[in-house]
Image (tube, rainbow, N blue to C red):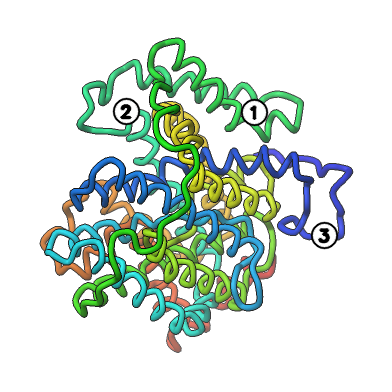
């Protein structure tokens, strides 16, 4: 990936994530972040709402709450205050990791109040665990971070494929070649604009492709904006609209396991974005990021939302655009808050055809994987131990992606822990790295083997 020249108006003495690009650029680049993750942030409330038997208006409240809380969490993570917020360009939103567990809680009679109660308690437990969890940074050398970042990109690819096929497996046009054609056109626009000499146009390639792809889809009859004007224009979020939280031990226990998975994935995302931005990520920064994660998760049920986490697809956008300013992402958080308060704007963004997002997603998610491969290129493979760590971690991370039913007969906590390729690869890489490089009988030889790799950091 080529290296963009730094704008003359950027202070060279300020590290990349702290550069302020001006309000106009913040809004444009921030909107690009919102469009990139919009499909991902509204999917969990749509799935959970349908499973809970909610009607359309109540599902809309869950979606609005997801956008509103995601915006607040993003601002907290990027701007931050003492001990809260990694102050990196990280977009926050509802985590997919908790969807299966929440569906189980809802379907076993607890309903949404039990799910909300479990999220609150599990998030508070996560807050107390953060100081201990943040110290695992020393177990994340390039051989581990490279595996995790690569698997983040690979794990997101099926999401892009689903979008390309239409987004809804039950729809009549699921997998229609016309959907694929629309995605290919969007992808072609991204590639064309990425080849231009203009730095601004290259950095806005994703946003331009989504806009032009939507226009093409409209004239081809694939985009429907008829519902944009229906419904309210402005709506304040409701407090405990679905009832006061209910605290059940079994629900809290299962959600606590989910919290550990989310903390693992958020740690991986913070390390990944630090690698891309080129800034130091230490245990303090990870701790601040995790505390912001857990605080926003604990507050989210008040508004009708669920566990919050860093959105990996936006890591790819930072990598492909080279826009590393946290203020851009903070602006994206502001846009999400507005979307949560203005349902009409949310309906407009929701009208963007899924294949258009899928075409852009192919580049975005592939870029994350490419960033991980670039990190793995720093690893010394002359030591066969590192080769085994990489090979085994990536292969195990692929298991839930290749076969969703692989862990179906295992206990629920195992399914929760390993359902994600990201968490599977991360846990495997950390474990093997400890076995090969930290235990007394292997540490000495591994330090000699990894010395050339670590000397570059």
Mark 1 vs mark 3: give the one in front.
3
In the rendered structure, the answer to whether residue 355 lies left or right of residue 324 reads left
The residues tagged by marks 3 and 2 sit, at their Cα atoms, a distance apart of 43 Å
Q: Nearer the viewer, residue 164 or 38?
A: 38
The residues tagged by marks 1 and 3 sit, at their Cα atoms, a distance apart of 27 Å
Q: Position of residue 284 (x, y in %)?
A: 61, 78
Q: Nearer the viewer, residue 182 or 274?
A: 182
* Residue 144 sits above or below residue 28 on the image: below
Q: Residues within 10 Å of mark 2 (few under 14, many from 20)?
A: many
Point out the image quarter for the C terminus.
Answer: bottom right
In the rendered structure, the answer to whether residue 290 lies left or right of residue 199 reads left
- Determine which residue is flagged by label 3: 14
Q: Residue 89: which quarter of the image?
A: bottom right
The residues tagged by marks 1 and 2 sit, at their Cα atoms, a distance apart of 24 Å
Marker disc for residue 165: 2
- Determine which residue is flagged by label 1: 194
Q: Residue 298: which quarter of the image?
A: bottom left
Point out the image quarter for the N terminus.
Answer: top right
């Amino acid at each position: 990936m080529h290296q963009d020249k730094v704008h003359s108006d950027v202070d060279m003495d300020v590290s990349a994530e702290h550069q302020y690009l001006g309000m106009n650029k913040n809004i444009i680049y921030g909107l690009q972040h919102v469009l990139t993750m919009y499909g991902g942030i509204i999917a969990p409330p749509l799935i959970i709402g349908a499973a809970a038997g909610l009607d359309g208006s109540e599902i809309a409240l869950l979606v609005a709450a997801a956008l509103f809380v995601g915006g607040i969490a993003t601002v907290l993570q990027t701007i931050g205050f003492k001990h809260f917020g990694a102050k990196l360009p990280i977009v926050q939103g509802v985590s997919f990791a908790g969807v299966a567990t929440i569906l189980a809680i809802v379907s076993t009679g607890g309903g949404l109040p039990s799910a909300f109660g479990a999220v609150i308690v599990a998030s508070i437990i996560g807050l107390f665990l953060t100081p201990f969890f943040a110290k695992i940074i020393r177990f994340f050398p390039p051989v581990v971070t490279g595996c995790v970042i690569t698997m983040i990109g690979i794990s997101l690819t099926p999401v892009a494929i689903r979008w390309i096929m239409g987004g809804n497996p039950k729809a009549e046009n699921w997998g229609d070649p016309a959907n694929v054609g629309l995605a290919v056109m969007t992808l072609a626009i991204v590639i064309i604009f990425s080849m231009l000499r203009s730095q601004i146009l290259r950095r806005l390639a994703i946003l331009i492709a989504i806009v032009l792809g939507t226009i093409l889809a409209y004239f081809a009859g694939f985009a429907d904006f008829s519902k944009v004007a229906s419904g309210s224009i402005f709506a304040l979020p409701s407090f405990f609209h679905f009832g006061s939280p209910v605290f059940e031990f079994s629900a809290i226990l299962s959600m606590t396991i989910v919290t550990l998975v989310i903390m693992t994935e958020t740690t991986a995302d913070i390390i990944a974005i630090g690698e891309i931005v080129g800034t130091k990520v230490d245990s303090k920064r990870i701790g601040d990021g995790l505390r912001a994660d857990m605080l926003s998760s604990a507050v989210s049920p008040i508004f009708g939302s669920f566990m919050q986490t860093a959105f990996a697809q936006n890591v790819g956008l930072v990598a492909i655009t080279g826009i590393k300013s946290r203020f851009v992402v903070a602006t994206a958080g502001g846009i999400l808050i507005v979307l949560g308060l203005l349902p009409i704007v949310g309906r407009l963004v929701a009208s963007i055809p899924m294949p258009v997002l899928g075409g852009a997603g192919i580049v975005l998610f592939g870029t994350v994987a490419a960033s991980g491969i670039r990190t793995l290129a720093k690893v010394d493979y002359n030591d066969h131990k590192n080769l085994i760590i990489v090979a085994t971690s990536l292969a195990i991370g692929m298991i839930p992606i290749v076969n969703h039913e692989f862990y179906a007969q295992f206990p629920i906590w195992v399914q929760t822990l390993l359902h994600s390729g990201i968490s599977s690869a991360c846990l495997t890489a950390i474990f093997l790295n400890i076995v090969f490089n930290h235990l007394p009988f292997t540490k000495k030889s591994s330090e000699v083997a990894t010395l050339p790799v670590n000397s570059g950091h």
